[in-house]
Image (cartoon, rainbow, N blue to C red):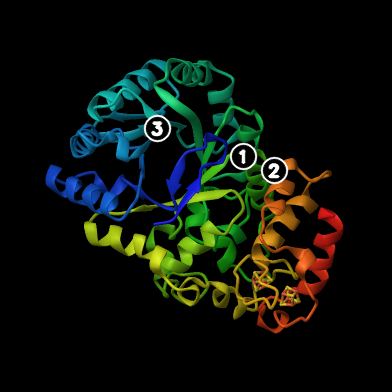
């Protein structure tokens, strides 16, 4: 397993974590088997948004005696009502459901308290202009949550939230298809891939790129949901690319976006956990997702780098996508953020090492003028 630092929280998090939604309705033994497998594979991060009492209790029982081995992301704003999950902004319901979660998980705190599912401007106001945000802050002050997070599918709302400075961790829906969808479309439209399936040329959504760049520069760690689009990207008949992607390709795409620390994969069995964790032993060729875009005439990246790494190897050992990710972050800002300059300075080889041999350029499926961009990086980073 590979571990990454979750932004400014400083937590060391497995790059593949566990989404627990498919554990609802499973027996206590089945839940324990999934959590055993996750820990055996080195996963140390679990997302628990479900308010359903039994699944909370089963997860708590499975973690009993080894709570410190798993970082828990627990949601603020879900409630179990009439036998169903419901999102709520009612303060009394929110408080009761959060306390119930702590009690059933057999813990006094969760590592990340995640304000649940804030997409619309109206809902943003219902959280950030009410007692809900004050309650979330009080949980942090009391130590019932160590860090505050927020989950969203809308890049504009998510950006507003992280710009408050209150949000340490963002949970966001990222996969190769959603990144080409219109950011104003709701999540249900995105899940149908409606934008990508429409005629015309599709480009990476700029609001999403801005969000990821902001999080990277400001130290807001991103954890990813819906990296496989609920499995639709793994099925050629449903994938908007006309071809099935693999689990390692989907995970790698998300992990190569700026700011992303971990991809949380929803698993309902030990074997699904192992399939997700196998990303860590996959080869570069197995992770490479460039062919998914490159063969599609409707996908236009206009010479933008997608950080796919297909251009490797570099004769000067430069990690080309790492340099270009930082270059894009610097270009997006009026002034190069200190964090970005710091990351660039920590690279073992950088644009200064480029000998302009252009050996890499024929390998790039997107026509990026690599030597030219290296020279731009040299000028920007000095
Ligand atoms: S042009 Fe620069 S980045 Fe490309 S292979 Fe040569 S040295 Fe590496
Ligand atoms: S330069 Fe091209 S091949 Fe290399 S990481 Fe960027 S998009 Fe991929």
Residue 34: % across, % down? 23, 51
Q: Which residue is mark 2?
A: 339
| Label 2 residue SS | helix
**Picture coordinates of residue 41 (x, y %)?**
30, 56
Depth order, front residue of 27/189: 27
- Depth-wise, is mark 1 or mark 3 nearer the camera? 1
Q: Residues under labels 1 and 3: Cα distance?
A: 21 Å
Q: Which is in the foreground here, disc 3 or disc 2?
A: 2
Q: Which mark is residue 346?
A: none
| Position of 240 relative to 33 (above/below) | below
Sequence-earlier tag: 1 or 3: 3
Q: Are marks 1 and 2 in contact (CB under 8 Å)?
A: yes
Mark 1: few, some, or many residues within 10 Å (few <14, many ≥20)? some
Q: Is residue 67 left or right of residue 214?
A: left
* First of labels 3, 2 by sequence position: 3
Residue 233's image quarter? bottom left
**Location of residue 65 by image quarter:** top left
Assign a secondary structure to mark 3.
strand
Mark 3–mark 2 Cα distance, whole angstroms, equals: 29 Å
Q: Looking at the image, is 142 positioned above or below residue 204? A: above
Residues under numbered marks 1 and 3 in contact, where contact means CB atoms less than 8 Å apart: no
Quadrant location of the C terminus?
bottom right
Question: Where does the image place residue 36, in percent across and percent down from the top left?
Answer: 22, 49
For disc 1, the marked residue is 219
Q: Can you identify the residue that label 3 sits on? A: 75
């Amino acid at each position: 397993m590979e571990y990454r630092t979750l932004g400014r929280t400083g937590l060391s998090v497995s790059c593949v974590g566990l989404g627990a939604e498919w554990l609802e309705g499973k027996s206590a033994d089945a839940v324990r088997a999934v959590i055993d497998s996750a820990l055996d594979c080195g996963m140390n991060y679990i997302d628990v948004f479900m308010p359903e009492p039994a699944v909370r209790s089963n997860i708590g029982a499975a973690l009993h005696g080894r709570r410190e081995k798993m970082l828990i992301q627990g949601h603020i704003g879900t409630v179990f009502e009439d036998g169903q999950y419901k999102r709520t902004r009612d303060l009394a319901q929110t408080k009761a459901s959060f306390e119930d979660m702590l009690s059933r998980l057999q813990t006094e705190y969760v590592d990340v308290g995640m304000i649940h599912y804030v997409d619309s401007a109206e809902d943003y106001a219902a959280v950030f202009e009410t007692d809900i945000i004050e309650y979330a802050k009080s949980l942090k002050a009391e130590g019932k949550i160590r860090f505050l997070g927020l989950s969203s599918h809308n890049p504009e709302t998510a950006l507003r939230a992280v710009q408050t400075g209150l949000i340490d961790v963002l949970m966001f829906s990222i996969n190769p298809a959603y990144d080409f969808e219109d950011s104003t479309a709701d999540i249900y439209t995105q899940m149908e891939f409606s934008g990508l399936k429409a005629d015309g040329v599709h480009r990476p959504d700029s609001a999403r790129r801005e969000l990821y760049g902001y999080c990277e520069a400001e130290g807001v760690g991103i954890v990813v949901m819906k990296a496989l689009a609920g499995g639709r990207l793994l099925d050629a008949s449903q994938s908007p690319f006309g071809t099935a992607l693999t689990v390692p390709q989907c995970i790698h795409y998300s992990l190569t976006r700026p700011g992303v620390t971990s991809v949380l994969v929803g698993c309902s069995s030990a074997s699904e956990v192992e399939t997700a964790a196998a990303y860590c032993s996959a080869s570069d060729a197995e992770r490479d997702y460039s062919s998914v875009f490159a063969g599609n005439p409707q996908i236009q990246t206009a010479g933008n780098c997608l950080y796919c790494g297909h251009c490797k190897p570099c004769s000067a050992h430069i990690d080309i996508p790492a340099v270009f990710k930082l270059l894009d972050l610097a270009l997006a800002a009026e002034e190069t953020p200190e964090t970005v300059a710091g990351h660039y300075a920590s690279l073992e080889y950088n644009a200064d090492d480029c000998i302009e041999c252009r050996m890499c350029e024929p390998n790039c499926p997107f026509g990026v003028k690599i030597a030219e961009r290296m020279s731009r990086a040299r000028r920007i980073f000095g």
